[in-house]
């Protein structure tokens, strides 16, 4: 039950929640644990850099931020995860009868999804490290200049609709709404971030920060984690 992350999404930024809100957050987590249908899928694709574009097999894109993240990589893992439609149904139901609970449920679901992604990414990372390979921080469409227009091709490449039920609206919003897609670089060396947020390959075996905020240069974001 990641209440700290839940309150970060609620914009508390280190401020302590009152007992009533704390109890509400705990109840929301308990409901989500009972109803959420956590599912994920991933697949490896070749990566090449051609004419200023990143070619990941099932789609191409131009993105300086993503290119920095993937520097030194020759392959990528495309990743998707979701909490399923029941999480959406809970939020929708409470939005009609108890707005305060719906707001906290939204935040708890976002925190739960992030935790689930971290858990699955750690499992994938361990698989690759057995082969002497290392993963970069996951980087999602919408971060920096990585366009959301890549979502349809990314989801098709993963067959995420058939495998875990993720679809897109005409405006490129994912359904279920508590879903994530991402690109994860595969490198022969571990990586770390330098002072200006770029990714650098290192040889000392240190583990990189895998949180999404580590891959995003938007330092004034309301929901940005501290100390990354």
Image (cartoon, helix red, strand yellow):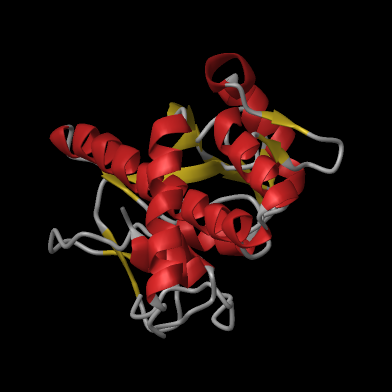
Q: Is residue 225 left or right of residue 154?
A: left
Q: Is residue 214 above or below residue 130?
A: below
Q: x, y percentage for residue 169? A: 81, 35
Q: Count the labels in the image.
A: 0
Q: x, y percentage for residue 72? A: 39, 53
45 or 24, which is in the foreground? 24
The residue that appears at 58% across and 57% down in the rendered structure is: 101
Q: Is residue 27 above or below residue 133?
A: below
113 or 152, which is in the foreground? 113
Q: Quadrant of residue 13?
A: bottom left
Does residue 214 show up? no
78 or 107, which is in the foreground? 107
Q: Is residue 101 left or right of residue 152?
A: left
Q: x, y percentage for residue 117? A: 40, 44
The residue that appears at 66% across and 55% down in the rendered structure is: 98
Q: Is residue 228 left or right of residue 153?
A: left
Does residue 133 show up? yes
Quarter of the image with the C terminus in it: bottom left
Q: Residue pushed farthest top?
A: 162
Q: Is residue 228 above or below residue 62?
A: below
Q: Quadrant of residue 6?
A: bottom left
Q: Residue pushed farthest right?
A: 170
The residue that appears at 62% across and 62% down in the rendered structure is: 100
Q: x, y percentage for residue 22? A: 39, 67
The residue that appears at 43% across and 70% down in the rendered structure is: 20
């Amino acid at each position: 039950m990641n209440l700290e992350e839940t309150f970060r999404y609620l914009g508390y930024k280190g401020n302590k929640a009152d007992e009533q809100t704390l109890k509400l957050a705990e109840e929301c987590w308990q409901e989500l644990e009972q109803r959420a249908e956590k599912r994920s899928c991933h697949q490896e694709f070749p990566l090449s850099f051609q004419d200023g574009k990143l070619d990941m097999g099932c789609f191409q894109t131009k993105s300086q931020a993503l290119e920095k993240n993937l520097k030194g990589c020759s392959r990528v893992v495309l990743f998707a995860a979701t909490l399923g439609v029941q999480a959406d149904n809970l939020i929708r139901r409470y939005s009609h009868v108890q707005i305060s609970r719906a707001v906290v449920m939204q935040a708890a679901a976002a925190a739960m999804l992030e935790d689930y992604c971290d858990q699955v990414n750690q499992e994938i990372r361990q698989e690759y490290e057995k082969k002497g390979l290392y993963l970069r921080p996951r980087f999602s469409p919408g971060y920096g200049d990585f366009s959301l227009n890549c979502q349809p091709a990314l989801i098709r490449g993963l067959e995420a609709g058939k495998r875990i039920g993720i679809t897109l609206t005409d405006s490129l919003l994912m359904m279920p709404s508590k879903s994530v897609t991402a690109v994860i670089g595969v490198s022969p060396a571990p990586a770390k971030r330098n002072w200006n947020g770029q990714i650098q390959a290192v040889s000392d075996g240190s583990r990189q920060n895998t949180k999404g905020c580590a891959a995003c240069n938007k330092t004034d974001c309301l929901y940005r984690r501290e100390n990354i």
